[in-house]
Amino acid sequence: YVHLGDAELAVADFNNSVKYDKDNYDLYLEIYKQLDDLGFREYALQFVNMALQINGNSVKDNLSKGRLYMLLEQNDQAEPYLKKAADRGSEEATIYLCQIYQSSGRIDEASGLLQKFVQSESADPAVIGEIGDMTYASGDYQAALVYYQTGLSLESIGNVQQLIRGEIACYEQLDMWDEAKNALAQYVAKYPN
């Protein structure tokens, strides 16, 4: 029904779906996305609010509630949930926390969290590259540069090209032309094709 543009029938159908799986955050998020993508944000937000009523304190519960509050643009409510999930090992929660810190101008906290993540056994250059890409897209080129350089400092890196390209783009945005030229020369030497 949602693809036919009939929001009321779609909502009725979605309400039926959640009756059978009331504690499934992913279901609520998927319903939110479908309704919001088609311009039914008011209805979509109803499902976010329903999901926030789920009780639980697992990593998934905290991560999901944090994400839901971020959808509502209530980062102050999202932060404690994401901190709990990140403290219990959720890389995804770490990414969202970095986004919250960045969007509120708390770059030092974002960098500190990233450094803690990098020093952990689960440090993943792909995750760090993703954080760098999100930071770059938000226009904070200095912070993005730190993320790319941090990713490049790790031992086992599968996304070197992404990280170096990001580093070069940051240098260019920051008018650091000599650094951009040197990074580009290294990139071309390493990846001539």
Image (cartoon, grey):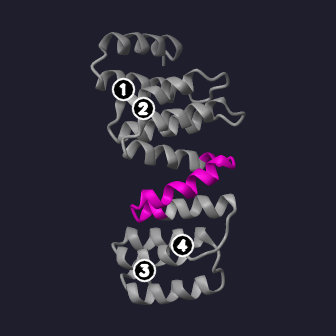
Q: Main secondary structure of the magenta part?
A: helix
Q: Which residue is mark 2?
A: 144
Residue 52 is tagged as 4
Residue 53, visible in the rendered structure: yes
Q: Amino acid at mark 1?
A: Cys
Residue 170 is tagged as 1
Horizontal side, residue 175 vs residue 132: left or right: left
Q: Earlier in the sequence, mark 2 or mark 3?
A: 3
Q: Amino acid at mark 3?
A: Val
Q: Mark 2 and 1 residues: CB-CB less than 8 Å, in contact?
A: yes
Q: Mark 3 and 1 residues: CB-CB less than 8 Å, in contact?
A: no
Spatial CA distance of label 4 from label 2 is: 32 Å
Q: Earlier in the sequence, mark 3 or mark 1?
A: 3
Spatial CA distance of label 3 from label 1 is: 41 Å
Which span is picked out in magenta? 69-91
Q: Mark 4 and 2 residues: CB-CB less than 8 Å, in contact?
A: no
Q: Amino acid at mark 4?
A: Leu
Residue 160, visible in the rendered structure: no
Q: Earlier in the sequence, mark 2 or mark 1?
A: 2
Q: Earlier in the sequence, mark 4 or mark 1?
A: 4
**Labels 2, 3: front one:** 2
Residue 2 is tagged as 3
SS of the residue at dot 4? loop
User: Is 98 above or below relative to 141?
Assistant: below
**Residue 89 among those drawn in magenta:** yes
